[in-house]
Image: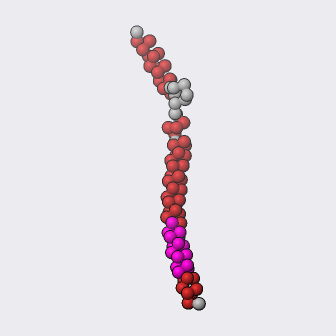
Amino acid sequence: MDRVNSNLYLQNLCIMEANERLRRKAQQLDQENKQLLAELKLKQQQQQYVANSPASSQALPPGGASAASLKTAAASMSGKRQTK
């Protein structure tokens, strides 16, 4: 009977040690998960800020120059023609 109890005690001890290792690993993974989630939220906020900023509405269209820069170039060209 003592031998059976000793075996059960050793098995229980091994299980408790394995549980402790798994608990520490789960805490580590949870901490990494929270850190990654915070980084993801920060990146999303930055992207939303850039998308909603006034500068983004004046971003260059696929053709190249913005409408404002085209107007400025046209005005300067017309001014040069008049001085000739």
Residue drawn at x 53%, y 52% as measured from the top left: 40
Residue 33, percent across and down?
A: 53, 59
Residue with the most extreme left position = 84
Q: Is residue 16 visible?
A: no
Q: How many marks?
A: 0
Task: Specify the quadrant that holds the C terminus.
Answer: top left
Colour option used: secondary structure
Residue closest to the eye, 63 or 79: 63
- Horizontal and vertical percent for residue 56? 52, 37
Q: Quadrant of the N terminus?
A: bottom right
- Observer-nearest of 77 and 2: 2
Q: Quadrant of residue 82?
A: top left
Residue at the outermost bottom position: 1
Q: Is residue 14 above or below residue 75?
A: below
Across and down, in percent, residue 44 comes to 54, 49
x and y percent of residue 83 in the render?
40, 12
Foreground: 21 or 81? 21
Q: Which residues are magenta?
A: 10-25
Instruction: Report if residue 40 is visible in the image.
Output: yes
Residue at left offset 51%, top offset 43%: 50
With respect to residue 39, does 23 lie above or below?
below
Q: Residue at x 53, y 69 (%)?
A: 22
- Residue lying at 55% horizontally and 75% vertically, measured from the top left: 15
Q: Main secondary structure of the magenta part?
A: helix
Q: Give the farthest residue toward the top.
A: 84
Q: Is 1 covered by the magenta stretch? A: no
Q: Is residue 17 magenta?
A: yes
